[in-house]
Image (cartoon, grey):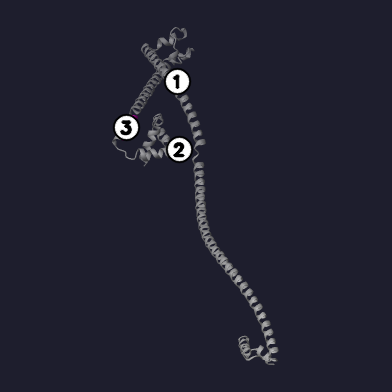
Amino acid sequence: MLFRTALALLDQHGSAILTTRDAGDAVTMLQSLAGSTFDSSHLVLIACMGYQKVDELVLQEFRTKFRPQVLAALSERSLERSMWSRRGSLSSKVLATQETFKKTSHTNNSPMGKKGDSTVEDVGYVNSNDSGMNEDSDHAPNALQDEAVDEEEACMADLMDQVKWLKAELSRALVECRAANLRADELENAFMELVKEDNRRLLSAKVETLEDEVAQLRQTLADKEDQEQAMVKLMLHMEQEQRIADDARWHAEEDAEAQRETANALQAKYEEALSALAAMEKRTVMAESMLEATLQYQALDQSAPVPLHLKQNHNREVSRWSWPRLSPRCAINED
């Protein structure tokens, strides 16, 4: 996984790593890049999915992509190292020559010091036309003076080359520094925008809060659905009971209507029976009155002689309308 992460970092930040001056800077930059982008989902996605299978073809692609830049950087740095070593050797030679010339001039000018003549201070500032130095220059060897002059001229030419190279390097460094500052400002602005737009901790906290709210809403929705189902079942049960009650009420109304009709029929029959009973009572009263009248008539006729055939007919009629002996009326008549 570390190897895949390194390949992903090289894929993303290869050009930035190649701008470093040495291996320590490269390692430091890799550590900073890994620390700043380790929580990046893009880096994790590239490391896990883009380099899931690393073989020789993938490594060859990396070689063809970054090897020319590495070789160019190596050649440039080797050239700089050689120039610095050459410059160091030339400066050491110049210093050694100056030291030897000073020693020889000091040994040659020491006997003339009692006369108050001036000594030579620097090789680059020797003037052969000076009258005060003619006696000292006559004592110095000609070969040593020529060698010092040649070395001074070579040193001046080398110094001029070094100055030109240093000016070029300084201008290039200033340009790179300006570009690096601009790049740093751009990166800082980009990082600030990313921090403003994609604050991962706040977003993760918000996502967790929203997930909790969604879970609570889902639980509330499930509870409401359960309550709705229970209410639907209760309403269906109540509707069924209401239908049963309506059917029972309808049957009870039908039974009441039938009972009402039966009661009306019974009332009509009762009234008819009462009317018939009243009529029968009237007829009974009329019959009793007629019977009393008949009995009175018979009592009156018993005092007068009646022919035999009329008496027999009258006895038949009386026997037809007569009461039994055990009836009260018969008892009253006997009394």
Label 3: state its secondary structure. Answer: helix
Amino acid identity at mark 3: Glu
Q: Which residue is rendered at x = 60% and y = 68% of the image?
A: 264
Who is closer to the viewer here, 196 or 306? 306
**Magenta includes 60?**
yes
Q: Which quarter of the image is occupied by the C terminus?
A: bottom right
Q: Which residues are magenta?
A: 58-66
Q: CA distance from mark 3 to mark 2?
A: 26 Å
Q: Secondary structure at mark 2?
A: helix
Quarter of the image holding residue 36? top left
Task: State the residue position of label 1.
Answer: 171
Q: Pinpoint residue 14: horizontal percent, then vertical percent.
A: 38, 32
The x and y percentages for residue 134 are 44, 8
In the displayed structure image, the side of residue 113 where residue 283 appears, left or right = right
Dot placed on the residue nearer the N-terminal end, 3 or 1: 3
For label 2, the residue is 36
Q: Looking at the picture, tell me which residue is in the foreground, 128 or 267.
A: 267
What residue would you read off at disc 3? Answer: 61
Q: Residue at x 35, y 28 (%)?
A: 70
Q: What whole-number distance in Å separates the C-alpha atoms at marks 1 and 2?
A: 32 Å
